[in-house]
């Protein structure tokens, strides 16, 4: 029920409260398809990391933007 949904996601991180770094970004639109996102984070192992998920509208309005994250996880 959101035919004009168009959202840009960005996954960022910060190590020990330091500068925010980008891990990746992707766009989602209302097309009836699921997209699996797999971003390697092995290089961050053993560090104190804060992950930041950012979402922003791509079409100038958030009126029809509805976000649904299915089973978000970080795996070792």
Image (cartoon, rainbow, N blue to C red):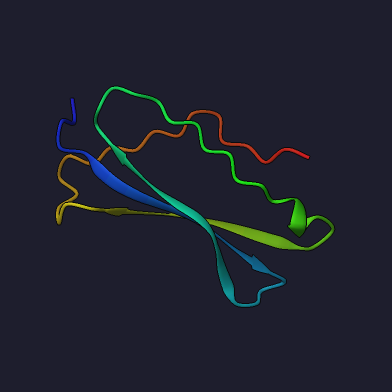
Look at 16% across and 52% down and name the residue there.
59
Picture quarter containing residue 66?
A: top left
Look at 60% across and 77% down and name the residue there.
19
- The vertical placement of 30 against 6, above or below, is above
Residue 1, image x, y percentages: 18, 25
Residue 27, image x, y percentages: 34, 45
- The vertical placement of 47 against 39, above or below, is below
Asked whether 38 or 74 is in front, the reply is 38
| Left or right for 45, reference 36 | right
Look at 76% across and 63% down and name the residue there.
48
Look at 69% across and 51% down and name the residue there.
41
Residue 68, image x, y percentages: 39, 33
Picture quarter containing residue 46?
A: bottom right
Picture quarter containing residue 72?
A: top right
- The vertical placement of 42 against 70, above or below, is below
Residue 70, image x, y percentages: 49, 28
For the view shown, which residue lies furthest in the right direction?
A: 46
Work out which quarter of the rendered image holds the C terminus and state it. top right
């Amino acid at each position: 029920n959101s035919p004009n949904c168009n959202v840009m996601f960005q996954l960022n991180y910060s190590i020990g409260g330091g500068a925010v770094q980008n891990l990746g970004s992707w766009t989602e639109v209302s097309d009836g398809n699921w997209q699996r996102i797999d971003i390697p984070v092995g290089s961050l192992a053993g560090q104190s990391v804060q992950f930041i998920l950012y979402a922003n509208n791509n079409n100038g309005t958030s009126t029809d933007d509805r976000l649904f994250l299915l089973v978000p996880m970080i795996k070792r």
